[in-house]
Amino acid sequence: MENRHPWYFNKKILFFAALITLVVFLVLFEYSSKMRLKATYQIQIDRILNKFKQNNIPTSSLELHELYHRGDISDNAADLFEKVFKIRDEQEEVLHPVVPKGEDDYYIDELPPVQQAMDSEKEKKLDEYLESCAQAILILKQAGDKKECRFPIDWTKGTSTLLPQISGIKDSVKLLCLYAYRQKQKGNIQEAMQAIVLSIKLAQYLRQEPALISQMVRHTSEKTALTMMAKLLSGTPVPKEYIQPIYSMIQDESKDFFSIQGCHAGEISMVMHLFEVYKDCDEMNKFSLGSKMSKWQHFFYMLSSYWEQDQLEYLTMSYDIYEALLKSHASHSWKLYLKTINRIDASGKSLPILKPITRLFLPGGCLKYNLENIALRRCAQAILAINMHCQIHKNFPEKIEIPIDPFDDNPLRYKRLNSGFLVYSIGKDEEDNQGDPVNDLVLEVQ
């Protein structure tokens, strides 16, 4: 083996040293680039968060918690609901033999028109059930006299403690609707309509609840109450003095803007809380709906700018919706608002998988539920107006001034039927399905 000059080995060492230096330089350069990119995204994130804060919109679960529990809540309906829910739970199994269990409004759909007799066995079981819940109904009447309803929940822990509370509201509305139905059948019209007023008020207690699930429950509850109201208009005419309190309640839309704004704020706060959760690998995997991340995968996920990109995407969409909400409120039309939500829904389908939170929690989810509530109440206004015309003139109106459908800014649709009439909104699909209850928002008087 020939002897090599020491310089040969020095060149080899220098080559490897240069190679290592180059690799280190490239790694540091890449890291520096990522840090600059992350910083750029963070500046944009902070800018949007500051815009929300300037408009008193909470952007964290702690801010939401403090805002929710602010002020005096001594006259609070939630204090009474715990007693009602306990009674309701004890009697829940009694209801199922009365009518088949299915969708949320199963008992309304299955019950015959109020002027027709029920099956004697079902009638007996329903009366037994209502008698067993008499104490709960009495407490609900007391709850209806309260100024507001705020549940004892901790928003910093998400919505895990919320569902048992608000589902009780839905069950209470169902109970009152069954009670109203039987009272109307027995000829106690005043008591029946007072129960409907109370059921609507209980549903509207959820107006200020800043969570998507709350607005979904509110929508179901309000639809249940208004559907039963329409059912009770059949048969024996309901005097105007019993209808007027309902009309006044559903005509008032002054709080709807603040309800939608509050729901949007709640969505933002909860999703921002989730972004904070995603900083921890173990906590992130608890929420993951797909494959889990290893510690190393999570490390590189956070090292990259994907987390910031996801957050920026969500906040940008949220602020677009908020601006559209303000403009729609100022113009008294929901067109721009709906157009913005539809655009965001469409863009959400093409979001990359590396924006998992925005893909999963597209902003605006609860907002169409609020518009559906507005549409249903306007349908109820039309139902009541048409019913009053029929009572006075003994015929159906050929033309009647009818409220505007918030989904297309056209009058709500009114259709005569062989056994009555219906009024409907085209609903969130924004297509006229001719009063199909599956796709349209329909209230019918038989």
Image (tube, rainbow, N blue to C red):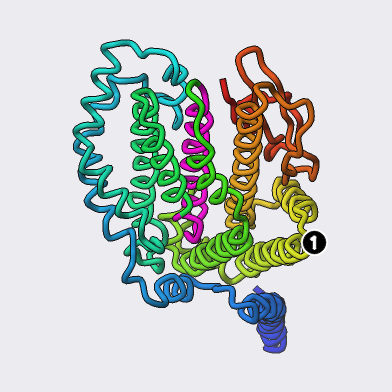
The correct choice, above or below, for 195 with respect to 59 in the image is above
Measuring from the top left, give residue 342's x and y in whole percent: 74, 48
The correct choice, above or below, for 291 with respect to 45 in the image is above
Evaluate whether residue 27 shows in this view. Answer: no
Measuring from the top left, give residue 34's x and y in whole percent: 68, 75
Q: Secondary structure at mark 1?
A: helix
| Residue type, label 1 | Ser
Q: Is residue 203 left or right of residue 250?
A: left
The quadrant of the image that shows the N terminus is: bottom right
Kindly indicate the quadrant of the structure image that contains residue 403.
top right
Is 72 or 170 nearer to us in this picture? 72
Is 222 or 5 nearer to us in this picture? 222
The correct choice, above or below, for 301 with respect to 189 in the image is below
Q: Categorize mark 1 by other alpha carbons within 10 Å: few (<14), some (14-19), many (20+).
A: few
Where does label 1 land, which residue?
A: 331
The quadrant of the image that shows the C terminus is: top right
Kindly indicate the quadrant of the structure image that contains residue 287.
bottom left
Residue at (67, 26) in percent of width and height = 393
Q: Count up the numbered dots.
A: 1
The verdict on residue 103 being magenta is no
Residue at (61, 79) in percent of width and height = 53
Kindly indicate the quadrant of the structure image that contains residue 418.
top right
Q: Is residue 113 left or right of residue 49?
A: left
Evaluate whether residue 181 shows in this view. Answer: yes
Measuring from the top left, give residue 266's x and y in whole percent: 53, 63
Residue at (26, 12) in percent of width and height = 121
For the magenta stretch, what is the residue range? 205-234
Q: Is residue 148 left or right of residue 126?
A: right
Residue at (59, 71) in percent of width and height = 303
The verdict on residue 221 being magenta is yes
- Magenta span main SS: helix
